[in-house]
Amino acid sequence: MRIKFARPRLGDAEAEALVTAVKRPHLSNGASVREFENRFVETIGGGQAVAVSSCTAALHLALLTLGIKHGDEVILPALSFAACAHSIEAVGAVPVFADVHPEAGQMDPEDVERRITPKTRAIMVMHFAGRVGYMGTMLAVARRHNLRIIEDAATALGATHSGRHAGLIGDIGCFSFHPVKHITTGEGGMLVTRSPELAERARSMREFGKWTDPHDLRSFVTYEIRGFGLNFRMTEMSGAVGCVQLQSARERLDRRRANYYKLEHALTDFNILKLGGLESAAYCLIVHAPDEVTQFELRHRLAQRHIETSVYYPGPLPLMPYYRDRYGFKPGDFPHSERIARNTVALSVGPHLGAEEMAYTAKMFKEATQQEA
């Protein structure tokens, strides 16, 4: 048996949608994209959606929409993907890294509050591996200090917090449709917000700061540039595929959760990060390697048994060469993030797998941890 960590599920329906899309007169930001946005809003239960070319684009657009500018500070987790910090730097702001909770990998609100300065303008919360972060506490921190909250919900489609879908808890949420995510459009992303004003601003900035008046016939042939913006548009082909993928989003999520619970139950003797639960999007199961085996050794042994694994993430972002050299971070600055990055292995619970694969993964994981060096 071979266990792939991720495998996009695309079929004839997506192919037919692509053919239809390429025959339409507009290939970018047209009818298919509008339909995808509307269906996405239905899927997450509210808000307004602005489709873009990637989740990185959504994060960048979110910062622009909220008016984050040169010299501002934005707090984000040390255990996060490069897109989070890079998008902050793209608007001229300064990324300020906070450590995470040792048991769940979610950004620690207490460490966030310690790092707030007069220059802090926003908090970027990344919902780690499909589990919504400590949003109740984080919202309270934001209110106390008059800060905005951006949710990186790249792995959290289907996740909720107190009944509200991820991405609709803070000011703006950002989703990814990369091939390894819950649904895919090849590449693509979505910005969501409960604020009509922010949604309108994001739609304008998505397309060079254009403004058109839907009640003025001249708007169909001309436009005004009323603000700054870039090209973050989604293609019609991506929108068409996204519409099809959303039709099976619930089934995919249910399968992920079922796989997660099976694997978690089979590995109860190991130290598993707290990422499950009824409100989790169950992106993957992350488990600590036992003390007697290194992360590298464990992944190598699992690979020999045809089990593909991943790591979230290969190292805390501030200790990667670019940020380490730029800001002078050193080992020990983010101890919980460092331990999770160094000691854990991510196991797949993707919808391309089932109960048999979960049983095999658990069996091979146990064998790999007991193998003689």
Image (cartoon, grey):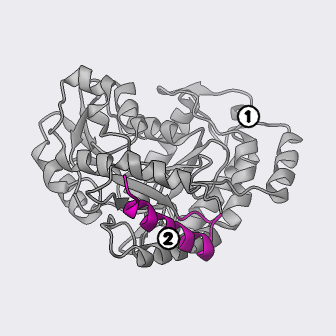
43 or 83: nearer the viewer: 83
Q: Is residue 314 left or right of residue 57?
A: left
Which numbered marker is on residue 363? Answer: 2
27 or 214: nearer the viewer: 27
The amino acid sitting under disc 1 is Phe
Q: Kindly indicate the quadrant of the structure image that contains residue 292.
A: bottom left
Q: Is residue 196 left or right of residue 134?
A: right
Q: Point out the stretch of residues depicted in magenta.
A: 349-373
Q: Residues within 10 Å of mark 1 (few under 14, many from 20)?
A: few
Q: Kindly indicate the quadrant of the structure image that contains residue 39.
A: bottom right
Q: Which residue is mark 1?
A: 220
Q: Position of residue 287 (x, y in %)?
A: 36, 61
Q: From the viewer's perspective, is the residue at label 2 or at label 1 nearer?
A: 2
Vertical relation: 362 (above or below) 89: below
Q: Is residue 19 left or right of residue 40?
A: right
Q: Position of residue 369 (x, y in %)?
A: 38, 61
Q: Is residue 362 magenta?
A: yes
Q: Kindly indicate the quadrant of the structure image that contains residue 189.
A: top right
Q: CA distance from mark 2 to mark 1?
A: 62 Å
Q: Earlier in the sequence, mark 2 or mark 1?
A: 1
Q: Position of residue 28 (x, y in %)?
A: 72, 36
Residue furthest to the front: 372
Vertical relation: 86 (above or below) 136: above
Q: Position of residue 343 (x, y in %)?
A: 30, 51
Residue furthest to the top: 325
Residue 5 visible in the displayed image: yes
- For label 1, the SS is helix
Q: Quadrant of the N terminus?
A: bottom right
Magenta region, main secondary structure? helix
